[in-house]
Amino acid sequence: MRALSWIIAVSLALAGCRQVNVDAHKLLAEPRMSTASVVLDLFFVRLPAADEQFANRLWNEVDEQKLPPAQRQRLARYGFRAGVCGAHPPADLERLINQEAATVQPAKNTISDFAVDPVVRRRHLQLLSGRPAEVIASSMYESLPLLEAAANGAVSGQTFKQAQGVFSLRAVPESDGRVRLTLVPEVQHGEAKQQFMQRDTHLEIVSQKPRKTYESLTTELPLAPGEMLILGAWNERRGSVGHYFFTEPTSSGLVHKVLVVRLSQTQHDSAVGAELAVDQLPTAALADQSEP
């Protein structure tokens, strides 16, 4: 037994300690995104009321032809307009964003008066493929009378109580590195009620308000990393759905705004492209149920 102990002791002494080489880069490597994940930056930008031509100049630099003609016509009948721009936003919009980046304080989740709130508000959003997210587009309206124009020119109306404009947003990565975005406008109204909702393989009880969903106004198109989808309203379509989504009543009158959705990153794009001016915006993110 003593001999066995001596043999073990000698073996350990001869073995000594061996340094294990570890690749520091592997230890420090950033975790990879899920292949089913998409990162978006959403900006609500309030347009300057004193410059009546600002919106015209903005939309002149947005490519609305990216949407099929039939889709553009449907959106226009309800007061919406949409288009795409490349890695840099239109010059006037970029100038406004850069100016606000240096002056805007972190935004509060509740807006009391849009006229005194930040001109630019940002939300950083990571989505799983096909999983919906809600983007609150308007403040809460005590009473919301909506006019709807049919293709034959007929106009109908409906009034909703305690109503708010919301976009249901989905993003699905494509094999070429682009992402297919889908935005569907909804009007949520009334009191929230508990109901069952299918979540993957099980049912959940959720509290939701009744909603009117405008499936025919779905905006769907692919974006490459860095590209931006811009949504807004036709200023002359007062009383339309788009008008209430993209205007805010203030003590000094109506304020118009646009929504900018920028594809920031996918797993196909591990390093986000060129640094953009919009990345310098204040990072006050909006909560899922906060007002824009």
Image (spheres, grey):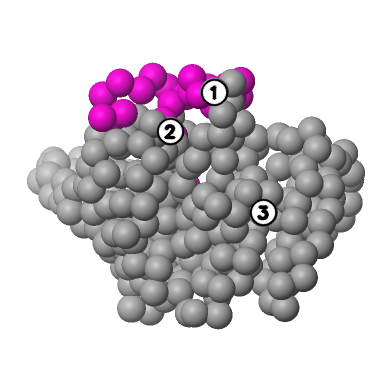
Q: Could you give the CA–CA distance between mark 2 and mark 1, rounded to whole angstroms?
A: 10 Å
Q: Which residue is mark 3?
A: 240
Q: Quick one: quadrant of the N terminus?
A: top left
Mark drawn on residue 252: 1
Q: Is residue 138 magenta?
A: no
Tell me the crowding category of disc 3: few under 14, some 14 to 19, or many 20 or more residues within 10 angstroms, Cα based. many
User: Which sits earlier in the primary sequence, circle 2 or circle 1?
Assistant: 2
Tell me, yes or no, whether the two marked residues, 2 and 1, touch with CB atoms within 8 Å: yes
Secondary structure state at the residue bearing disc 2: loop
Residue 249's image quarter? top right
Measure how far apart labels 3 and 2 are at the Cα level: 20 Å
Q: Is residue 260 left or right of residue 160?
A: left
Q: Quadrant of residue 186?
A: bottom right
Where, quadrant-wise, is the C terminus in this rendering? top right
Q: In the image, what residue occupies the spot 36% across and 52% down?
A: 56
Tell me: 190 left or right of 214. Answer: right
Disc 1 marks which amino acid? Ser
Task: State the residue at coordinates (19%, 48%).
Answer: 275
Q: Which mark is residue 49?
A: 2
Q: Which residues are magenta?
A: 99-127
At x 52% / y 72%, what residue is drawn?
72
Coordinates of residue 34 in the picture (x, y in percent): 43, 60
